[in-house]
Image: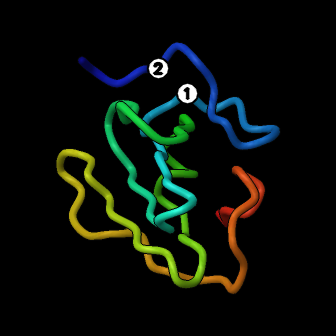
């Protein structure tokens, strides 16, 4: 399965094509960035720019699992997410 690029980024007002998928587990305070949507959990399509600038809330673990991308987004912020609204970019 390749990248899904026929829909727009989930960030309000952004018309960028989806280049990565944010999947998160609110209860476990974990998030992942993948090339394709996760099989479980809440997931949102993000454009290249928003995926690159994504920051996890304080206390959450984050892992960028996209091909060719090493590491995880830095953890920052002091608030839990409320859906997409709590994830800073």
Q: Is residue 14 left or right of residue 54?
A: right
As drawn, the residue found furthest toward the right would be 13
Rendered-image quadrant of the N terminus? top left
Residue 16 vs residue 32, the one in the foreground:
32
Q: How is the image coloured?
A: rainbow
Residue 17 rendering spot, x and y as whole percentages: 55, 27
User: Above or below — where is 59 with respect to 88?
Assistant: below
Q: Image point 56% across, 37% down: which residue? A: 44
Helix, strand or loop at mark 1 = loop
Q: Image point 58% across, 18% down: which residue? A: 7
The 10 Å Cα crowd at callout 1, few under 14, some 14 to 19, many 20 or more, is some
Residue assigned mark 2? 5
Residue 20 rendering spot, x and y as whole percentages: 42, 39
As drawn, the residue found furthest toward the front would be 27
The 10 Å Cα crowd at callout 2, few under 14, some 14 to 19, many 20 or more, is some
Q: Image point 39% across, 54% down: which residue? A: 32
User: Above or below — where is 26 with respect to 42?
Assistant: below
Residue assigned mark 1? 17
Residue 31 vs residue 15, the one in the foreground:
31
Q: Is residue 19 left or right of residue 26?
A: left
Q: Is residue 62 left or right of residue 48?
A: left
Residue 24 rendering spot, x and y as whole percentages: 49, 52
Evaluate if marks 1 and 2 touch, with contact meaning CB atoms under 8 Å apart.
yes
Q: Image point 54% across, 70% down: which residue? A: 56
């Amino acid at each position: 399965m390749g990248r899904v690029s026929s829909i727009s980024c989930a960030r309000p007002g952004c018309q960028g094509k989806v280049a990565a998928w944010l999947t998160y587990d609110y209860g476990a305070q974990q998030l992942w960035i993948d090339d394709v949507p996760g099989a479980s959990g809440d997931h949102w399509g993000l454009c290249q720019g928003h995926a690159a600038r994504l920051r996890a809330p304080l206390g959450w673990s984050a892992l960028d699992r996209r091909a060719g991308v090493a590491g995880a987004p830095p953890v920052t912020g002091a608030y839990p997410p409320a859906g997409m609204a709590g994830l800073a970019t």
